[in-house]
Amino acid sequence: MVDVLPSVFLRLKPKFTRVLLAAALVGTLGISAEAKAADDTIVVARAMDINSLDPARAYCDTCQIYLSAVYQPLLTLAADNKTIIPSLAEKWEVSPDVTTFTFNLNPAAKFSDGSPVTGDDVKWTLERLKNVKGSASYLMDSVKSIEVKDPHTVVITTKTPNSELLGILSAPYTGIINSKLASANGANAAEDAATSDTSDTWFLSNSAGSGPFTLESYKADDNLRFKRNDNYWGTKPAAAVVIMKQTADAVTQAQMLGSGTADIAMQIDPDTAKSIQDPNIVFQTIPSFNFVYVAFSPVAEGSPVPLTRDVREAIALAIDYKGAIDFTVGGEGKLQPAAIPNGFPGTSNLPDPETNIEKAKELLAKAGLADGFTLDLTFAAMNVYGIDLSLLAQKLEQDLAKINVKLALKPATFNVWVTDIDKPVPFTIGFFAPDYFGSAQYVQYFGMIPNMPWGTRAGVGKAEGLDGKEELELFNKALAAAIEQQEEAYRALAMKMIDDKIILPLVSPNLVLAHRKDIGGVRYSACCNLPLAEIVKN
Amino acid sequence: MTVAASLKSKSIWPGITLRWSSATLIFALFVIISFIVIAVTIPLWSPYDPVGMAGRRLQPPSALHWCGTDALGRDVLTRALWGTRYSLPIAVFVLGVAVPVGVLLGTAAGFFGGIIDNAVMRLADVTLAFPPVLLAMAIAASLGPGLVNTAVALIIVWWPIYARLMRAQVLNVKKLDHVDAAVIAGAGRFRILFKHIMPLCWSPILVNTTMDVGLVILLASGLSFIGLGAQPPAPEWGQMVAEGASNFYSWWIALAPGMAIFLISISSNFLGDALRDVLDPQVKLPA
């Protein structure tokens, strides 16, 4: 007899389908029930990248939205994305040598449990941010001491002049925490807080801020719910409840907007946005401060040829920058000359990146590499700011083929990529969004300065032509510069960083802010991403 | 008289008659042979460069680009045609390793029994205990993304199916009278195995292998779709469908590779069905 086993795959299928259908049905019902809950409920569809909800430990784009809705820093950024305006501090003074900063807290400010915001809370919060040693702790690097003069006066002293401290203190990560409440739940600001502070879990289901909202609940990979803070000391937000709904991809976000199950989405790529003709959806396309870049590590193992400055410049010249913008975001982006976003201090009149295949070939020929070589390009296979990095990698592969450099694409998951770049790898694609308004964070992260992330990866002090001394000097000068001299100081740094040819910014994509027609007050902020308190539903 | 009907009455060799499924068989053969011809000859007549820019990006199908262009301005049809050079070899390679390994182990288990049978079958049980897609994903993910690793993952998932199938066949044939007769006649163990048992075991293996060509291609494309198989810019079908999914409103990007996967899968199923009809004497002919 013939006994042909039915394939295991075919047997599995119907069951699978049924489970999927049931899941889809439950999902749809869940969403629509939420959307119809109340008129003053706002639903944001978003791929959430939350690593923590503790202001000292959180470090992500969604964290910026969360922290600026629930906590308040001393200062904040106005809607022009440039001017620093009062938040918890109503007045401040900066000493002429830019090392002593005095803040007067607004006496009306109170936390969501009704207790007043005091200088002790400020001191405790900022010291804790430093001592927890999270990703955002670098913001406190320059702080020498924090002194509480009286319950409403705080004096912060920095080790060296730091003209950016005001910008730093408007970052959502510096949001002031109710120290009594948090301390009672395992938080502390001691020097060993990195290990002795056990409040991370408590912060996932509770908030202790003075902001317009409080945390109602958080379910990882599902939703984040905000409730209006009834004790809020400023103008109360119009929305009683804001729900951030985990929605992985741009197409689903667009469909949820179309069906009315979501009110706002800000991760729809320009290509998808262009193909949607729905009178109920409003698209605002605005320049962002985010950018995607490629970067070299001349000291990385696994590089087939020495990545000298000539080789790096040749590769930089072979890249079709305008084409990259057209291909990845349908032309909805800007060229970015240096690793400091357009519009930040030091970026006026910088020379645009140049494409010149002939010159690139000459440089390679000079280096004895006219026949080219194969170079690995490591990147995270994901979509950031509407740019499909895999697509961008394929575009680079096409560009570099013109100078006989063959790119071998090495996609990885985000977590693998994050560890890979510190190995480091010879050539990679990265991306960056600002933590606050100010250029120092870019010099710190991208500059060829010893012990800084990219300085280390590129091998400052080890790689030829990258001694790091000049940039460090320029950086110290920029930090000591008065506000009006910052532009010039950072411009000198930007020119030097362009000349290093380590970081090559490719695209500064426009941001597509999409929302339903009946939603108002949606804007993009350089510090806080999406200020939830300003959103109204008509 | 249609082609199918005219074939109905003809016989290709004594005792075997082609039936209505001849139409599907001809279709299947046509598709599979075309795909093989395309895979072999595509470098000679490729309409465009499969990895280079061929025109404006995201253009819907037109006279210049029959299946449109993708987000990098590459011709989708050209890429789908080149895709045969990934999918067909991977199917041949996976089955080319998994089938002999499975058959060998299955034969040993069925013929010798005892500890060999137990060892081989328990190992097969362990492998079959996991859902194959999940197991292949886990193996491919741990080995790292890439076509070769995908093939290794699929081989590991696939051999037990053939080991079981072959063992069942050997156990059945072993009980037949002619085997007893050979034993009485004093034939050696290996003579019995190779001359009297194995020749009777081949047809289900052949039928299953033919049908599995489609399944291997489907699963390999599936792994590429989730980013574990072929890596960009390779014009692999699953990978192309993934690109289509991220450009959801440009429907044409996923259409050509999707159709290719569909055609090859359904053709290998048709061919397998037809082969079973021909090879299996127990399937009743329709009146």
Image: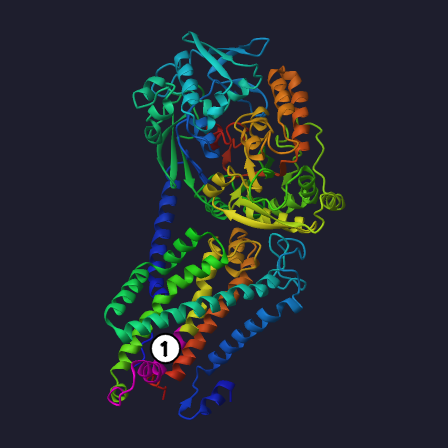
Residue B139, x across and y down, in percent: 40, 55
Q: Is residue A139 above or below residue B256?
A: above
Residue A246, x across and y down, in percent: 42, 41
Mark 1, secondary structure of its residue = helix
Q: Chain of mark 1?
A: B
SS assignment for the magenta stretch, majority? helix
- In this rendering, would B205 be left or right of B93? left
Residue B187 magenta-highlighted: yes
Q: Nearer the viewer, residue A425 or A293?
A: A425
- In this rendering, would A42 be left or right of A457? left
- In this rendering, would B72 be left or right of B167? right
Residue A494, x across and y down, in percent: 66, 28
Residue A46 magenta-highlighted: no
Examine the rendering and report whether any part of residue A273 can be seen. Answer: yes
Q: What span is in magenta? A: B183-208
Residue in view at x 53 percent, y 54 percent: B231
Q: Which residue is mark 1?
A: B204
Q: Nearer the viewer, residue B130 or B71?
A: B130
